[in-house]
Amino acid sequence: MERIIKKDPLSKKEIKKIIDLPKIKLIHTSTSIEILEDKKMFSDFKIFFKDENQVNFNTSGTELRKLEYILGDINKKEFNDIIYLSKNNVNMSTTLTSLCSKHNLKIEIVETNSDLNDSNYIISKLYGAKVHKSPEEYSKQLINKITKDKQKDLIKTYVINEQSIFNLAGILAYINYGIEIEEQVKQLGLESPNFWSAETDTILGLYLYAELRKLKWTFTYTSSSIKYKDIKTKILNALKHLKINLDFDLSNINIIKEKKEINIKEKYKKILILLANTKGLLLDMNSSVKSMFHLMEKIKNNQIEKNKEIVFINSGNFIEIFSDKDILLK
């Protein structure tokens, strides 16, 4: 039965009921919001910095939240053998293999990144995963072959990327995360926070939470390729899966297109080192550092309103940094 969301805000209890899907609890603490003040970096702005590295130091907070739902689905369907297709050096591999080791699940990773010295590859192997290297264009064929070989031995295989929960888990996780953040921004006295992130699911989950709660939240999302039509499609798919009929518009999401300069990684490096050296904070080169770079650029160029309440969400997983060691150690 479809739930029609009316003009009145939903209670937190009602939201929890909507996202009540099978889940394994992996996160047992909230992550704090630190206030960053530095005239050289942020002019007169206060940056409210929420750090997902606090969730678990050897995994990614962003991925861990998604995996609560993915492992819940695996557990419900009683699978023991898992396959995951890892593209573009993502942090999911290390977090997933760590959890499979803890939960006695067999995991095979099909990795499309050809670098054998990649940190995700090395750490996934350390956690006991079987890692297959494959060009992206042949990766699905390889997964089909692995699955068929296991079927011969009567082994059922759960291919994460082929499950409906795979595209939904991150949004569910960050709708749920909204409950934690709402309490924190209220305590800080923030009335209209502007959330910054380069993670799609983070932005969309918090956006939906704000829509359901009728909150005055806005969002700034850094992306190299995603457009408003892509965001709309993802939201509609999530609403359909959750059986929600919700009128929405995307006017409170601002997409910043990631710069494609020849020396852009050098600029990211400077930001990463600056935050680490002066604030003791680690960003990853894959997402958070890009969002921080654009935030600092806009502050420098006076492109942000002076009264803006900026909440920056650091996605976590410092392990990703080691894949860029050649750039960082120059």
Image: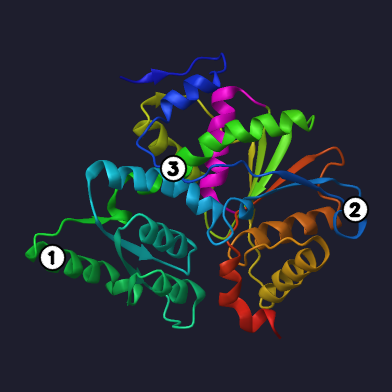
In terms of depth relative to the viewer, which is nearer, 137 or 26? 26
Q: Earlier in the sequence, mark 1 or mark 3?
A: 1
Q: Mark 2 is on which residue type? A: Ser
Task: Give the class, few, some or many, for how many residues have Cα within 10 Å of label 1's Cα (few <14, many ≥20).
Answer: some
Q: Which residue is mark 1?
A: 148
**In the image, which disc is placed on residue 44?**
none
Report helix, strand or loop for mark 1.
helix
Q: Label 3 neighbourhood size at 10 Å, few (<14), some (14-19), many (20+)? A: some
Q: Residue 80: image x %, image y %?
A: 24, 55
Residue carrying label 2: 43
Badge 3 marks a residue whose secondary structure is helix
Q: Please state which amino acid type lies under the numbered disc 3.
A: Lys
**Nearest the eye: 99 or 49:** 99
Residue 111 position within the rendered picture, expressed as x and y whole percent measured from the top left: 37, 72
Q: Mark 1 and mark 3: span between their CA atoms?
A: 31 Å
Q: Residue at x 42, y 31 (%)?
A: 19
274 vs 154, left or right, is right
Q: Label 3 belongs to which residue? A: 234
